[in-house]
Image: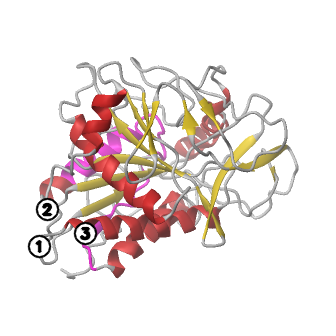
Amino acid sequence: MDRKKVCLRSAGIIAALVVVPLGIWGFSFAAPALSDISAAGAVISMGGSVSPKSSAPGESAMLIRAPVSAGCRDLEAAPEEIQLRSSVPVEIASAKPDPAVIAAVPYPDNMDSRDGTVLKMNFGHYDGSQYFDLDGGGQVRNGSDEWDNNDLYNESKKPPDFSFETSEGEPLVLIYHTHTTESYEPSDRDFYDASFQSRTTDPAKSVVAVGDRICQGLEAAGIPYIHDTLLHDYVSYNEAYDSSRTTVKELLAKYPSIKIALDIHRDGLQREDGTRLSPVAEIDGKDAAQIMLISGCDDGSLGLPQYIKNFHFAAALQQQLEGSYPGLTRPILFDYRHYNQDLTTGSLLIEVGSHGNCLDQALYSGELIGKALAALIKENSP
C-alpha cells in the first residue's frame, strides 16, 4: 500500500448498482424537487445579525430555510441537508459503477437561460446570542439547549480526542460524499438557468472534484487517506445517508487507523424571491467558496453520545482554516444534527459553497481545506 496515498476510488463494498430506465426516470423526476428544497421553508430570524462584506445596497442576508430531520429546528444553515431515513432495505452504491450510471445525469453543455439572479456576497462576522468567537479565528453558532456559550467556548479550547499519529501506509483521513451528485454553476456569473438542477453524476463536475482537491493537499503532505467516490444519492436520494453509513462503517472496520471522516457537501442558499446566494471570500486574490463545518449535538434522542468530541475537532479545524485563510469560513453550526457523526470522534459535515457558487470557486476551497487539514495534522502529530 502506498505510503503517502491510500486513495480507494472504488471501495468494493456490497452489491452492484443496477441501472434501469425506471431508476433513471425516478431520479430525474425527483431532481427539481431536491433542487428546490431550500425554497420550501419559511423565513425566520437568524438569531442575530450578519454583516456581509460585499452585498448590494439594501439587500438582506435573510435566507430561505427548510425543515431538517425530525426533532431538529429550522435554521438558515444547510437548508439542503435534510437527513432522511429509509424504511426499506438499502441498496448500496456500486463499487464499480457502470458508465451508464456516471452518464445518467450529465452536466449540461448549455445553461444560458437567465431565469434568476445569483448574488455574490461574503458572510462576515455575526453578532447575537447564539454566536461566539473562537480564540484562533472563526465563530460558532450554538443551537444547543444543553450548552450555554461560555461552557461551549471552554470546550472549544480542548484538543481533539484522538491521536494524529499515522502508521506507514495506514489511512488517517476518510473523505466521502453522502450527496455525491451535488454540483455547481459552470462559471462565476450573476444569473442561473433553472433547467439545471445543480446535480450531476459526472464526478469531474460535482462535490467529488472538491474532495479530490482536499485529497491532493493531504497527499502533498504525505498524509494517507481514502476518498470514497461512490454515488450514494443515486438512484435513491432518500437512502443516501443509509448508503454512506454502510460504506463508512465497512471502511472503518477494514481500516481502524481512520480517525477523521469528512462528509463533503455543497449548500443551497436561496432567498424567497428566487435569488441564489454565492458565498465567497477573497483569498490571495482569488474567490473561494465560503465553507461551513457542521458538528451535530444531541439531547439524548439522536444517538450521538460522544458528540462533544467531534466539536473539539471542529473547533481545531475551524481555527486552523480561519487562521490560515481569514474570511473563508462561516460559523460552525453546532446543532441537533446526526449525519452519521457517531461513527468516529473526528466526524464532520463540511458545506463547500452553495448552488450559486461556480465550480472553480469550490475547487479552490477544496484546495485550501486540504492544506489547512494537512497543517493541523502535522502540527499535532507526535
Q: Amino acid at mark 3?
A: Glu
Marks 1 and 3: which is nearer the front?
Answer: 3
Residue found 21% across the figure and 51% down from its top: 160
Circle 2 SS class = loop
Marks 3 and 2: which is nearer the front?
Answer: 3
Judging by the rendered image, the residue that carries numbered circle 1 is 167
In this rendering, the answer to whether 81 lies above or below 4 is: above
In this rendering, the answer to whether 213 lies above or below 178 is: below
**x, y percentage for residue 117?**
82, 45
Q: Amino acid at mark 2?
A: Ser
Circle 1 SS class = loop
Residue found 44% across the figure and 61% down from its top: 323
Specify start and end residues of the magenta stretch as a single range: 222-250
Q: Mark 1 touching mark 2, by CB under 8 A?
A: yes
Judging by the rendered image, the residue that carries numbered circle 2 is 257
Q: Which image quarter holds the N terminus?
A: bottom left
Is 232 included in the stretch rendered in magenta? yes
Lateral position of residue 45 relative to residue 321, left or right: right
Rounded to the nearest angstrom, the CA distance separating label 1 from label 2 is 8 Å
Lateral position of residue 313 relative to residue 127, left or right: left
Neighbor class of circle 3 (other Cα within 10 Å; few <14, some 14-19, many 20+) is: few
**x, y percentage for residue 237?**
48, 39
